[in-house]
C-alpha cells in the first residue's frame, strides 16, 4: 500500500478523449517514492464514499491525483483515497519483503516515506 490518505486534486472528467484518459494520473515524484511504474496496475480505494476501482497509474503533474475517463464517476476533488499495489513473492522472499508506504498530508505533501 504505497500511499495512504491523499486527496483527489482535480474534479475528474468522465469524457474519454484518448486512451491515456481512462487511467489514474499521479504526481511523478510520488510514483518514484512509492516505487510505482507508469502503467502499473493499482487499486484506488475512496475513503470518503467507499468506492473501489482497479486501474493503471500514469505520470501526472506536481501533487496530482486524478481519475480520468469512466473512472471519474468513482470520486471527486478533495476526497481522501488509498492507493494499493501488489507483488508476487516466492516462499523464500516472504520474510524479506518490506512494503513501501508513503503517507501524505495537506496539499498531498509527503509526511512520511
Image (cartoon, grey):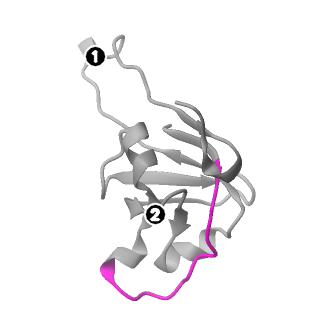
Report x, y in % for residue 16.
43, 87
Say whether residue 29 is magenta: no
Decide which of 37, 93 is in the foreground and name it: 37
**Residue under numbered circle 2:** 61
Report x, y in % for residue 74.
61, 69
Q: Are marks 2 and 1 in contact (CB under 8 Å)?
A: no
Decide which of 56, 3 is in the foreground and name it: 3
Decide which of 74, 21 is in the foreground and name it: 21
- The crowd level at tag 2 (other Cα within 10 Å; few <14, some 14-19, many 20+) is few
Decide which of 71, 111 is in the foreground and name it: 111
N-terminal of the two: label 2 or label 1? 2
Which range is magenta? 6-19
Which residue is at a point 30% across and 55% down the rendered structure image? Answer: 38
Report x, y in % for residue 52.
58, 58
Which residue is at a point 34% across and 75% down the rendered structure image? Answer: 20
SS for callout 2: loop
Q: Main secondary structure of the magenta part?
A: loop
Q: Quadrant of residue 72?
A: bottom right
Q: Is residue 13 above or below residue 43?
A: below
Q: Relative to residue 63, is residue 31 drawn left or right?
A: left
Residues at marks 2 and 1, CA–CA distance in whole angstroms? 34 Å
Q: Relative to residue 94, is residue 48 drawn left or right?
A: right
Q: Nearer the viewer, mark 2 or mark 1?
A: 2
Q: Is residue 12 above or below residue 91?
A: below
**Residue under numbered circle 1:** 93
Amino acid at each position: 500500500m504505497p500511499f495512504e490518505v491523499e486527496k483527489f486534486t482535480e474534479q475528474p472528467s468522465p469524457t474519454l478523449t484518448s486512451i491515456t484518459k481512462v487511467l489514474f494520473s499521479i504526481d511523478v515524484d510520488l510514483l518514484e517514492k512509492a516505487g510505482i511504474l507508469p502503467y502499473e496496475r493499482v487499486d484506488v480505494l475512496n475513503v470518503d464514499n467507499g468506492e473501489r476501482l482497479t486501474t493503471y497509474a500514469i505520470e501526472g503533474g506536481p501533487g496530482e491525483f486524478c481519475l480520468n475517463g469512466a473512472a471519474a464517476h468513482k470520486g471527486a476533488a478533495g476526497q481522501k483515497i488509498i492507493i494499493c499495489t501488489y507483488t508476487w513473492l516466492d516462499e523464500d522472499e516472504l520474510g524479506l519483503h518490506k512494503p513501501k508506504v508513503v503517507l501524505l498530508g495537506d496539499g498531498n505533501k509527503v509526511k512520511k516515506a
